[in-house]
Amino acid sequence: MRIAIIGWGSLLWDLENLEPRVTGDWSYGGGPRLPLEFSRVSPKRKLGLVVIIDPTHGAPCPTSYIKSVRSDLSAAVSDLAARERAPIERIGHAQLGTGHINSSNPPLNETLTAWLAATGYDACVWTDLPANFTEHSSHEFTIEAGIAYLKTLPPASLDEAKRYIENAPGETITPLRSALATNAWWQSLPLTHEDETSDAS
């Protein structure tokens, strides 16, 4: 079985403990187009915002993929769960020809299975973490609310948020990222470079 690991966030620049479990290079932009937005507050990233699949607030963006060394789907799921420090049930996966799909966003199932059929992979796995902005901020996610939230972060957290958002692939053009690209406050923040840690793929 050929299994692809789909990524769009820090996974692309920091495979971390997943590195021994993949082979070859990333196919940047070769993954399925998925609705992405920086709408998840990440405890592992000092409460900065990270990019996730978000059909409600996101915009369709290219994703990337890399081949797993595994030939067993459950093993590939476990590998990604370990890298993401996420529960097994929060790792999405789909297997072509079996109808077996674990996804919190069923409308995307056809997109994922069509991508598998087009690429020749038998299965794929991805991080399926939910948006949690409202739980952390007491506000529904909007562009304005996202920027306002970023402004409340202490310096170390804001620095982490800036680095993460700016390091995301250039083609990950979400509504919030587009707004930040022309926001004078955000653009005035320095971009530092430190060792990366993980949360969302």
Image (cartoon, grey):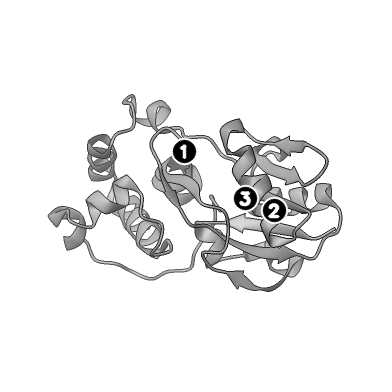
Q: Residue drawn 74% across and 61% down? A: 120
- Mark 2 to mark 1: distance in Å? 21 Å
The amino acid sitting under disc 2 is Leu
Q: Position of residue 88 (x, y in %)?
A: 72, 40
The amino acid sitting under disc 1 is Asp
Q: Residue furthest bottom?
A: 24
In the depicted structure, whether residue 157 falls above or below residue 109 = below
* Badge 3: residue crowd in 10 Å (few <14, some 14–19, many ≥20): many
Which mark's residue is nearer the viewer, 1 or 3? 1
Q: Is residue 111 visible?
A: yes
Disc on res. 84: 3
Tell whether 93 sits left or right of 146: right
Q: Nearer the viewer, residue 18 or 56?
A: 56
* Badge 1: residue crowd in 10 Å (few <14, some 14–19, many ≥20): many
Q: Mark 2–mark 1 contact, CB under 8 Å?
A: no
Q: Residue drawn 52% across and 57% down? A: 63
Disc on res. 89: none
Disc on res. 116: 2
> Which structural element holds mark 3?
helix
Q: Position of residue 200 (x, y in %)?
A: 53, 50
> Which structural element holds mark 1?
loop
In the depicted structure, whether residue 166 falls above or below residue 154 = below
- Marked residue nearer the N-terminal end (2 or 1): 1
Question: How many marks do you count on the picture?
Answer: 3
Disc on res. 54: 1
Quadrant of the rendered image containing residue 59:
top left
